[in-house]
Amino acid sequence: MGAHAHSGSRGRLLGEHPDAALAAQYSLQQHVRPDMPPTMLIHANDDRVVSVHNSQVMAQALAAAGVEHELHVFAHGGHGFGMHLQRGSTLALWPALAQAWLVAGAGAEDGR
């Protein structure tokens, strides 16, 4: 959980003044391994709750470990957009992107 972690989540998980070892233990980007499954990250740049920096750092860690991944950062969408999407927005494309990514990954399993 780095400097850009959501402060409320960080406090509830680690306490108010965690030591560096405990913070590192819960920092997912520090536990990326080459044998991890392909990963898709989706984030909105205007998320005021969780910094997009977190997804960028995770993507860098995945790249460094050679893990297949995609990072999609949308200009607008805020935090927790889920399936409540405004028609015509580029963010509305994320479910189709995720579906295509999943189908492409399934095809890769059997050599297609």
Image (tube, grey):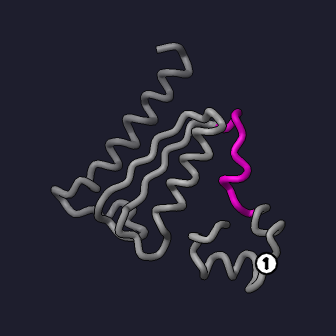
Residue 95's x, y, as percent? Answer: 35, 48
Q: Say left or right for 52 vs 88.
A: right
The single residue placed furthest to the left in the displayed view is 88
Task: Tell me the residue that label 1 is attached to.
Answer: 18
* Range shown magenta: 26-36
> Residue 93, image x and y in percent?
28, 48
Which one is in front, 11 or 61? Answer: 61
- Residue at x-position 43% and y-position 28%: 104
Residue 91 drawn above or below residue 50: above
Q: Residues within 10 Å of mark 1 (few under 14, many from 20)?
A: few
Magenta segment: does it hold 94?
no
Foreground: 51 or 100? 51
Q: Is residue 97 above or below residue 15?
A: above
* Magenta-span inclusion, residue 31: yes
Q: Amino acid at mark 1?
A: Pro
Depth check: 23 or 107 in front? 23
Q: Is residue 98 above or below residue 83?
A: above
Name the residue located 62 percent from the left edge and 71 percent from the top edge: 3
Helix, strand or loop under label 1: loop
Quarter location, residue 7? bottom right
Of residues 97 and 21, the one nearer the viewer is 21
